[in-house]
Amino acid sequence: MSIIAQSSPNIALIKYWGNRDDELRLPAADSLSMVLDFPTVSATVDSSEVLSIRSYDHDGIEKLQTEASVDRLKKHWTLTKKFLRSIGRTQELPEEISITIHSGIPPSIGIASSAAVFSCLAEAYAALVRGKALTREEVSIIGRLGSGSGARNSFGGYVALENHGEGIGSAYGRQIASEEHWMLHDIILVPSREEKKVGSTEGHAKATTSPLFAERIRQIPRRMRECIDAIQRKDFEKLQTVSEEDSLDMHHVMETQNPPLRYLSDATHRIIDDIKTLRDREKLQVLFTMDAGPTVHLICTEDSREAVEAFAGRQKDCIMFKAKTGKSSHLVEK
Ligand code: PMV
């Protein structure tokens, strides 16, 4: 029986950086993001005699599996079974599975491709469990076990990843507001398709070596409150202030950890400077934010969309993606 699930990236407004448990991807602090509707990833999962993994890129070309990516998928499956055992739900799971992934997202450039892939697999794995359906929180936990930020795709719209106590199931998503509550656009500018050398899994593990990390953790509860309030009231200026503060702060932590991680490029900084000038001049509602890569996400309201898209279109050396607030990971077929 094939199960097909679909998911997409999310863009963090309050970033997740650093873990209290690297193995279980339990975050050091809460975070919050907007789920996007594009680009999408789909995964087909079947029971199988042996674990088999196939993956295709946005042009439908089969990708060579690196040992590291196979190990990550294997580990996720093992941790998924461990979590399901902890809630008494493993009995009917197949011992091994075959996984086929079709991804429309260029990997490793700051468009959350792993969040999309692992939240998609979480959706499919949850559907393998017979009997009573898993809760959305449980699906979120399974996503988190492959990619911490993937926990924020099991609800639509605006989703917080929050910590609750200890143990494998102690961090999961909560919907702050649905996609219908406030539709925002994310005009994504990719200045370079070069894949990053150090991924976020490795980066999280070194976050505590930054002298700025402890202060970041102290600031997060306030930022979370401000961000949640801004979303609930649809207060764009407040959202802009807190999310830009948090994105730049995360990059300062990354740049001062050991070894330092410099994800932002000259092109990133130029785009930020230019969008600030344009925003002041034309009174646009647009904010910038960057995840683990040079890619700039320009999040804007419907009223400012045209001007932001025109700005993005003028960045001749960048690839542009247009996305907006999207729905949760979901099953396509079972
Ligand atoms: O889920 P991970 O391990 O790929 O970490 C994501 C980290 C950031 O994208 C930089 C921030 C975030 O909250 O998405």
Image (cartoon, grey):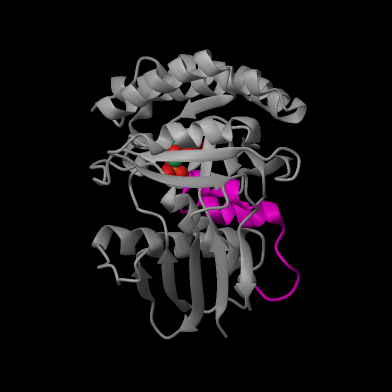
Q: Is residue 262 above or below residue 1?
A: above
The residue at the point 43 percent across, 52 percent down is 114
Q: Position of residue 47 (x, y in %)?
A: 50, 82
Q: Is residue 199 magenta?
A: no
Asked which quadrant contains residue 320, the reply is top left
Asked which quadrant contains residue 205, the reply is top left
Q: Quadrant of ligand 1?
A: top left
- Note whether residue 262 is visible: no
For this view, does 145 lie left or right of residue 160?
Answer: left
> Residue 12 versus residue 26: which sits nearer the camera?
12
The residue at the point 48 percent across, 27 percent down is 288
> Residue 133 versus residue 278: which sits nearer the camera?
278
Q: Is residue 223 above or below residue 71?
A: above
> Residue 232 versus residue 14: which sits nearer the camera?
232
For this view, does 313 lie left or right of residue 242?
Answer: left
The residue at the point 56 percent across, 73 percent down is 4
For this view, does 17 lie left or right of residue 141?
Answer: left
Q: Which residues are magenta?
A: 129-154
Q: Is residue 27 above or below residue 48?
A: above
For this view, does 111 lie left or right of residue 70?
Answer: right
Q: Position of residue 123 (x, y in %)?
A: 59, 63
The image quadrant where one finds the C terminus is: bottom right
Asked which quadrant contains residue 237, the reply is top right
- Note whether residue 181 is visible: yes
Q: Position of residue 24 (x, y in %)?
A: 48, 47
